[in-house]
Image (tube, rainbow, N blue to C red):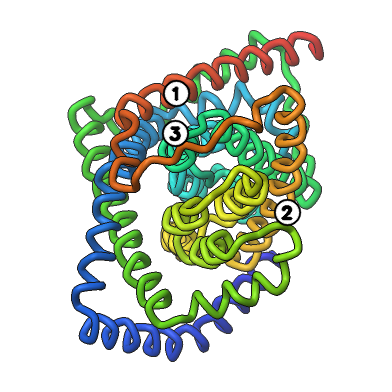
Amino acid sequence: MALIEFSGLEYRMAGRLSIPLTIIIILLVSLFMLINPEATVQAASQGIILWYATVLPALFPFFIVAELLVKIRLVHFLGVLLEPIMRPLFRLPGCSSLVVVMGFTSGFPVGAVLTRKLYEQDMLSSEEAERLFSFTNNASPLFILGAVGVGMLGNPAAGYLLALAHYISNLMVGFLWRFRGKPGPDKGMPLGLRFSQAYRSLTPDSPAPPESIGKMLGDAVRSSLGNVMAVGGFIVVFSVVTRMLSNGGVIDLMAASVMRLLGTFGLGYPQAYGLCMGIMEMTLGIKTAVSSITEHQMLAVLIVISAILAFSGLSIIAQIMSIMAGMPVRLSFYILSRLIQVVLSCLITVLAYKIALIHGIGSLGVNSIPYYKILYAFNAWTFSLISIGVAGIILALMLLAAALRTSKSS
C-alpha cells in the first residue's frame, strides 16, 4: 500500500514537471530538424538500420514466443513447479521464472512486457512487479556477443567477458532486492502433488471455449509487431536527439567534465565522449567508445562499455517505462537499480579482466571492423533462434532443480 501511495506522489510530481519539459524538448528537436535536415535524416537512417538489422530479428521471435507462452498458460504451469526455486532466491512467485529466463536471453524490453502481462493477470503484486522488472531487462546476448564482441571490438573473448559481467551483476541486483520482499507463504508439497496441481493450472477456470491455434498465433504476431515497431520508434527518436546534443556541443561539455573526474584512470576522450553518448543511446555510445581504442586502453574501454550496458541509456529506459505505464512502479527505483548494476558490473569487469590476463585472454588484439559492416558480421536471425533454445534449456534445468529440491524436502 505504501508503494502505491509513494508511486502516486511520484507520478503527480513527475506530471507537474513533465509537461513544460516535454514542450521544451519538442520545440528544441523541431528547431534542430528545421536547421539541420541532413543530419536529422542521417541520424534517423542509422536508427532504422540498427532496428531492422539487429533489433527486429533479435526481439520479434521472442515477442511472439512470450505471447504464446502466456496464452497457453505455461506461466501458470511454471508458477507451481518453480515456486521452490524462485521464492528462496528472489522472494518472487514461481511464474516470474519465465520473465527471468526470457529477459536474460532475449534483451530489452521483453522482461517489461512479460512483467506487465503477469501483473495484469493478478499473478504478481505491485511490489513484486517492481522488483521483477528492475532486473529482468538486459542487453541481449546477440548484442553483447555479436554486435559488441565480434563487430565493434573484433574480440569474441571480450564479448564473453562483458556478457559475464552484465548478467551476473543484474542477477545480483535481483538478489539484493529480495530483502525488500516478503518470504511468502510456505507452499511445500510432495513432488507428485505439485505436478498434479501444475497440470490442473493449464486449464483456465472460466468456462469459455479455448482459443484456436490460428487465433492465438495471429494475435501474438499482431501484438508482437506493434511492440517491436514501438521499440523502433524510440530508437529513431533518440538517435535524432543524440545527434542534436552532439551537434550542439552538449555532449562535448559532458565529456570534458567526465575527463576531469576520471582522466587519471586512463580514460581517453573518445571513451569519455562515448560514455556520455551512452547515457542517451546505448549502441551509439559503445560505438563511439571503441572508435579509437589502443591495446593499453582495453580495460578502460571494457569498463566504459560495461557501464553503458548496465545503465542501458535513456532511450531504452523510456521504452521500458512506456510499457510499464499505468502500473504502480517507480522510475526512480528502476534508475537506482541501473546505477547499482553499473557499479557491480564495472567491478566484475575489472576482476574478470585481471583473471583473463593471467590466462592470456586479455592480451588479444583489438580488430574492430567498419561500422557499416558490424550489423552484418553475424546472422541475427540464427542467433535469436539459438537464444530461444538456450532459454528452453535453462527452464528445463530450473525444473530439474525444483523437482530435486521438492523431493528432498518431502
Label 3 residue SS = helix
Instruction: Report the residue at 31% width, 28% height from top.
Output: 379
Residue at the spot of label 2: 343
Foreground pick, 140 / 285? 285
Which quadrant is the C terminus positioned in?
Answer: top right
Residue at the spot of label 1: 202
- For the residues bearing labels 3 and 1, Cβ distance under 8 angstroms: no
The kind of residue on which mark 1 rests is Leu
Spatial CA distance of label 3 from label 1 is 42 Å
Label 1 residue SS = loop
Q: Nearer the viewer, mark 3 or mark 1?
A: 3
Q: Nearer the viewer, mark 3 or mark 2?
A: 3
| Mark nearer the N terminus (2 vs 1) | 1
| Mark nearer the N terminus (3 vs 2) | 3
Q: Give coordinates of residue 215: x percent, y percent.
A: 20, 33
The kind of residue on which mark 2 rests is Val
Quadrant position of residue 355: top right
Instruction: Report the residue at 36% width, 71% height from top.
Output: 243
Q: Give coordinates of residue 356: x percent, y percent.
A: 71, 29
Q: Give coordinates of residue 9: x percent, y percent.
A: 62, 79
Spatial CA distance of label 2 from label 1 is 41 Å
Spatial CA distance of label 3 from label 2 is 25 Å
Instruction: Report the residue at 18% width, 28% height from top.
Output: 214
Neighbours of disc 3 within 10 Å: few (<14), some (14-19), many (20+): many
- Disc number placed over residue 150 in the picture, else none: 3
Instruction: Report the residue at 28% width, 28% height from top.
Output: 210
